[in-house]
Amino acid sequence: MTWRFGSPVAPLRALLDRGGVLAIPTESSYGLAADPRNPEGIALVYRLKGRDAGKALPLVAADLDQIVALGVDPAGPELALAARAWPGPLTVVLPVAGELPAAGGGATIAVRIPAHAGLRGLLAELGRPLTATSANRSGEQPVLDPDAAARLLAGEDAEVVDGGRLSGGPPSTIVRWRGGRLEVLREGAVAAVEARRLLTE
């Protein structure tokens, strides 16, 4: 139930294809990762979180190509601006074409390219972005070590990507553009003033 960096990724790819879930290390805590296009995997994430379906799940991607493949306009000004802040703990809400299970029925996705180099490498090897909502029941504290992540996933079609004990700290900052103006939806690891500087100047 534990996968370590440097191991073959084929078992993880097969797990994601059949609707399984990973616990992945991010910059601060472990996240619940499913293929954003797989409705079974997304449903399992909602169940593990104890969250009603319909709330969009944040995503992490290895690079801009993975984001564009989700249906984000490669020529859109929002993507070019967001790229200034990546890799890093700044999540940007972007419009997406077509239906995507991870979007919860909406027309946008919240996505970032993480600063965690090991995670970026894994995403590149898997050839897909993944969800990255915090690995905990809604309302509980984020999970910081792989053993706690394994307890959360016990009995499920799931695997823990062992990134060791993580440092914790604030989650990513979430922003979106509305009416040409940048809104900070959640201030986290990137201060609001720094987010505005990165994305508007």
Image (cartoon, rainbow, N blue to C red):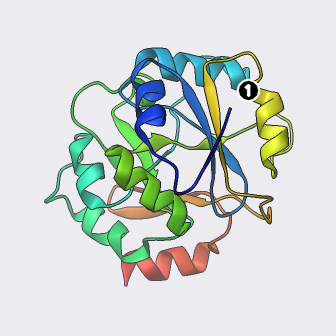
Relative to 119, is 14 above or below?
A: above
Q: Position of residue 93 (x, y in %)?
A: 42, 50
Q: Is residue 27 left or right of residue 7?
A: right
* Residue that extends furthest to the front in the rendered view of this protein: 7
Relative to 67, is 181 above or below?
A: below
| Viewer-nearest residue: 20 or 59 | 20
Relative to 2, is 83 above or below?
A: below
Label 1: how many Cα within 10 Å (few below 14, some 14–19, many 20+): many
Q: Is residue 122 left or right of residue 133?
A: left
* Residue 2 found in image quarter: top right
| Viewer-nearest residue: 124 or 196 | 124
SS of the residue at dot 1?
helix
| Viewer-nearest residue: 104 or 36 | 36
* Residue 201 found in image quarter: bottom left
- Quick one: quadrant of the N terminus? top right
Look at label 1 and name its amino acid.
Leu
Q: Is residue 87 left or right of residue 27?
A: left
Number of dots carrying numbers: 1
Residue at 41%, 27% in the rendered image: 14
Q: Position of residue 166 (x, y in %)?
A: 77, 61
Relative to 66, is 115 above or below?
A: below
Residue at 35%, 27% in the rendered image: 37
| Viewer-nearest residue: 184 or 152 | 152
**Circle 1 is placed at which residue position?**
153
Q: Is residue 137 visible?
A: no
Q: Position of residue 144 (x, y in %)?
A: 81, 52
* Residue 132 found in image quarter: top right
Q: Is residue 12 visible?
A: yes
Residue at 42%, 32% in the rendered image: 35
Q: Is residue 185 left or right of residue 9?
A: right
Residue at 56%, 80% in the rendered image: 194
